[in-house]
């Protein structure tokens, strides 16, 4: 089925470990973005991309890295995990302009101990 | 710059009564506005969107919202609540440039938890 696929769904990391959260979409969307969801804070933008080879920082980029080498994939890298990065992470994509709305993945629940 | 304020963190209604979830926004440019719903431990589903066409927007499951530029509001309503409407609702804004394209960034409100009593 067409959509946004996130892997893994659950992950436990130890402080200082690194990992990559995967996001792939098969709708040929230009825009892709990563959000983290914390209780009472809504979703906050980490990084976003308006096309292959183009990325920019969002509201809370520290500790995260992204790249966009293809239209389909937008991985999020945690460089050195910290307990403050315990959160639920969502990837989203849309056509350029965003007017048709954004499609969200089902999320990755990350716990850093 | 863009921002969103959801005026109620919790709303409680009885089944069959009207629902009103309030949202005010701030935007430097003509905004696109969205309402998303999130059921427990699920992803986000688009309910409806406003992108400068009709100011009264109809969405899925009987929800609708009215864009009021003078009040910078985009409140979500439903005439009759159903038990399955119990969820968290997010109002979302995206700035659009003069050409109508967005910058690719969404700003979320803090969310409103809707509880529906039998």
Image: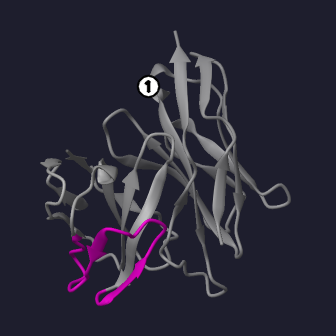
- Between B14 and B5, the residue placed more toward the observer is B5
- Residue under the point 37% across and 69% down: A62
Q: Main secondary structure of the magenta part?
A: loop
- Residue pushed farthest bottom? A53
Q: Position of residue B88 (x, y in %)?
A: 48, 36
Q: Is residue A69 magenta?
A: yes
> Left or right: A75 with respect to B47?
left
Q: Position of residue A30 (x, y in %)?
A: 35, 80
Q: Is residue A1 visible?
A: no
**Which secondary structure lies at badge 1?**
helix
Please state the extent of the stretch shown in magenta in the rendering: A52-76
Q: Residue at x 65, y 69 (%)?
A: B31
Q: Which residue is mark 1?
A: B84
Which of the image's four quarters has the N terminus of chain A? bottom left
In this view, the residue in front, A12 or A95, is A12
Residue drawn at x 19%, y 54% is: A15
Quarter of the figure that contains the C terminus of chain A: top left
Image coords of residue A38 (percent x, y): 41, 46
């Amino acid at each position: 089925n067409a959509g946004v696929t996130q892997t893994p769904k659950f992950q436990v990391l130890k402080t200082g470990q690194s990992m990559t959260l995967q996001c792939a979409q098969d709708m040929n969307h230009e825009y892709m973005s990563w959000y983290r969801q914390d209780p009472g804070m809504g979703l906050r933008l980490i990084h976003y991309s308006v096309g292959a080879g183009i990325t920019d920082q969002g509201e809370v980029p520290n500790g995260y890295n992204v790249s966009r080498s293809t239209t389909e994939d937008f991985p999020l890298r945690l460089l050195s995990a910290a307990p403050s990065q315990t959160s639920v992470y969502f990837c989203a994509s849309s056509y350029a302009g965003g007017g048709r709305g954004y499609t969200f993945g089902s999320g990755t629940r990350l716990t850093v101990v | 710059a863009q921002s969103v304020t959801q005026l109620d963190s919790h709303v409680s209604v009885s089944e069959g009564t009207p629902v009103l979830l309030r949202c005010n926004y701030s935007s430097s440019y003509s905004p696109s506005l969205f309402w998303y719903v999130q059921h427990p431990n699920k992803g986000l589903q688009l309910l409806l969107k406003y992108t400068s066409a009709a100011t009264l927007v109809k969405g899925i499951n009987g929800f609708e919202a009215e864009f009021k530029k003078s009040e910078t509001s985009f409140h979500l309503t439903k005439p009759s609540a159903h038990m399955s409407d119990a969820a968290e609702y997010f109002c979302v804004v995206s700035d659009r440039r003069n050409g109508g394209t967005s910058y690719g960034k969404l700003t979320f409100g803090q969310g409103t938890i809707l509880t529906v009593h039998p």
